[in-house]
């Protein structure tokens, strides 16, 4: 499902216009992005939670040359599915 299909599904499920559904989805994405940028955790009970984790620097290999390289540390976004979502997907 892409963003346009998600907007269509939100509009149909919540009895909204597509424009209103797009604004709602964009607001959710913006609020979630801002919270994660500050280092906060976003938890949606039953669905899951988004959080930021620090990935340490590590050694790796260039697949073309086989030469060892250092992969720098960075922050990554993680999603952990909630119990209800996990049960539905089983």
Image: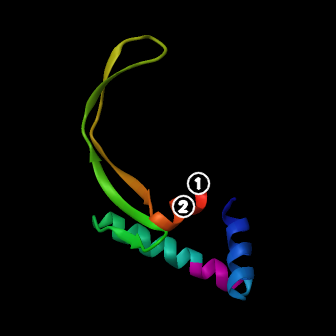
Question: Can you say whether 15 is above or below 85 in the image?
Answer: below
Tell me what residue is drawn at x 24 percent, y 39 percent: 56
Residue 23 shows in the view: yes
Estimate the x, y position of residue 67 in percent, counting from the top left.
Answer: 36, 12
Tell me what residue is drawn at x 44 percent, y 11 percent: 65
Q: CA distance from mark 2 to mark 1?
A: 5 Å
* Residue 89 belongs to the span the image colors magenta: no
Which residues fall within the magenta stretch?
19-24
Tell me what residue is drawn at x 58 percent, y 54 percent: 90
Residue tagged by mark 1?
A: 90
Residue 18 shows in the view: no
Question: Can you say whether 40 is above or below 54 in the image?
Answer: below
Estimate the x, y position of residue 25 in percent, counting from the top left.
Answer: 58, 75
Tag 2 near tag 1, CB within 8 Å: yes
Say which mark, if any, is on residue 58: none
Q: Please state which of residues 87 and 75 is positioned toward the viewer in this rendering.
A: 87
Looking at the rendering, which quadrant does residue 44 occupy?
bottom left
Q: How is the image coloured?
A: rainbow
Give the SS element for disc 2. helix
Image quadrant where one finds the N terminus? bottom right
Say which mark, if any, is on residue 87: 2
Tell me what residue is drawn at x 59 percent, y 62 percent: 88
Estimate the x, y position of residue 53 in percent, counting from the top left.
Answer: 29, 52
């Amino acid at each position: 499902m892409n963003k346009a299909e998600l907007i269509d599904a939100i509009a149909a499920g919540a009895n909204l216009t597509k424009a209103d559904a797009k604004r709602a989805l964009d607001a959710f994405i913006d609020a979630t992005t801002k919270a994660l940028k500050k280092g906060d955790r976003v938890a949606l009970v039953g669905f899951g939670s988004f959080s930021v984790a620090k990935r340490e620097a590590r050694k790796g290999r260039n697949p073309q040359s086989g030469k060892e390289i250092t992969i720098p540390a960075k922050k990554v976004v993680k999603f952990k599915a909630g119990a209800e979502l996990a049960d539905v997907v089983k």
